[in-house]
Image (cartoon, grey):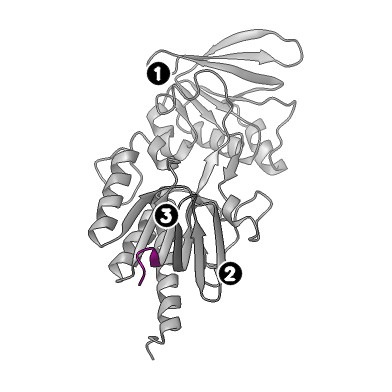
């Protein structure tokens, strides 16, 4: 096998990609994981306390480092570069960067999705220190504290409802005059007296020195500027799947790649796993499960091509 030829190339080194790498390498496949420098959402987790069997809690970066070390111990290789194209000729995939060409029998797309950011002062600076994009991950750290939720769609309303079970001081802020969530979801929030609703308002800045302390908001109808005290700010203004390389694959209305339960796409040998994939629940544990399934499916596909199927 050529130096740049692999049984499996995995794009993305988050929980899904690393899980696929571990399972595939442990199954005696030649595996390359390619990172393009974009960090996994797991890096934003201060304490990962809801992953089964990982206790006491660990930080997201520590968890990812351990997964990478584990995959490496089984023989997976890692590179940091940007893949510009993926093509398939016959049973082989060709992946090209600016300077190198790689060949693979199978490819797993685990590039994930990124939270749409507000792009306001304080958002990046206070990420992980009060600014969060995952209520399930970080909500318990703000029990009985002042919580701001930004957004008006299904995710924002659902997460505001969850956060209201942790604190009696939850405020949801939406730039429009009504929620854009599904009617039933929106009605649950409107009927929840434990959640303060502020409409026609945009957040202009998140303030704080070492942690979130308040938000600056502007009423879009009156132009009035005011400040609201807060300990946690949860932002749910949409997600952006990182699917540019496989834009030809079928997607759901939100832009996520559609696969079957074996993580297979319509292209034989091409799999998608993790947050890039269309599914109802996105957590570290579901991403790792996707990766393991993708590796198992790819392994079976490779054995079939080699005539090694057990009967």
Q: Residues within 10 Å of mark 2 (few under 14, many from 20)?
A: few
Q: Main secondary structure of the magenta part?
A: loop
**Quadrant of the image containing the C terminus:** bottom left
Q: Alpha carbon of mark 1 to alpha carbon of mark 3: how far?
A: 30 Å
Residue beneath disc 2: 267
Residue 211 lies in the magenta stretch? no
Q: Quadrant of residue 60?
A: top left
Residue 16 bears which disc, if any? 3
**Foreground residue among 274 and 149:** 274
Residue 211 bears which disc, if any? 1
**Quadrant of the image containing the N terminus:** bottom left
How far from the left and from the top, in percent, is residue 96?
A: 50, 56
Instruction: Answer with left or right where residue 59 lies relative to residue 276.
Output: left
Q: Alpha carbon of mark 2 to alpha carbon of mark 3: how far?
A: 19 Å
Instruction: Answer with left or right where residue 295 lies relative to residue 61.
Output: right
Q: Are marks 1 and 2 in contact (CB under 8 Å)?
A: no
């Amino acid at each position: 096998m050529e130096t740049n030829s692999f049984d499996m190339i995995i794009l993305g080194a988050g929980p899904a990609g690393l899980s696929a790498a571990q399972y595939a390498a442990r199954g005696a496949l030649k595996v390359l994981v390619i990172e393009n420098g974009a960090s996994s959402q797991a890096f934003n987790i201060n304490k990962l306390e809801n992953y089964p069997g990982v206790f006491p809690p660990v930080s997201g970066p520590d968890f990812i480092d351990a997964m990478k070390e584990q995959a490496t111990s089984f023989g997976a290789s890692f590179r940091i570069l940007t893949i510009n194209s993926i093509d398939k000729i016959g049973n082989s995939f060709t992946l090209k960067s600016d300077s190198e060409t790689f060949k693979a029998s199978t490819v797993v797309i685990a590039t994930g999705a990124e939270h749409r950011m507000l792009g306001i002062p304080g958002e990046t600076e206070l990420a992980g220190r009060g600014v969060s994009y995952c209520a399930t991950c970080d909500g318990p750290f703000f029990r009985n504290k002042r919580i701001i939720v930004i957004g008006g769609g299904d995710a924002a309303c659902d997460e505001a409802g969850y956060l209201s079970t942790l604190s009696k001081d939850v405020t949801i802020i939406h730039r429009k005059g009504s929620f854009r969530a599904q009617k039933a979801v929106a009605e649950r929030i409107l009927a929840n007296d434990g959640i303060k609703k502020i409409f026609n308002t945009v957040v202009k800045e998140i303030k704080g020195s070492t942690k979130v302390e308040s938000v600056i908001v502007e009423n879009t109808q009156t132009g009035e500027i005011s400040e609201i005290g807060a300990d946690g700010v949860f932002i749910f203004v949409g997600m952006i799947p990182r699917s540019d390389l496989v834009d030809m694959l079928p997607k759901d209305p939100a832009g996520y790649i559609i696969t079957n339960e074996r993580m297979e796409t319509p292209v034989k040998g091409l799999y998608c796993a993790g947050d890039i994939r269309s599914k109802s629940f996105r957590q570290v544990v579901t991403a790792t499960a996707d990766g393991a399934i993708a590796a198992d499916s790819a392994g079976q596909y490779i054995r079939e091509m080699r005539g090694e199927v057990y009967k």
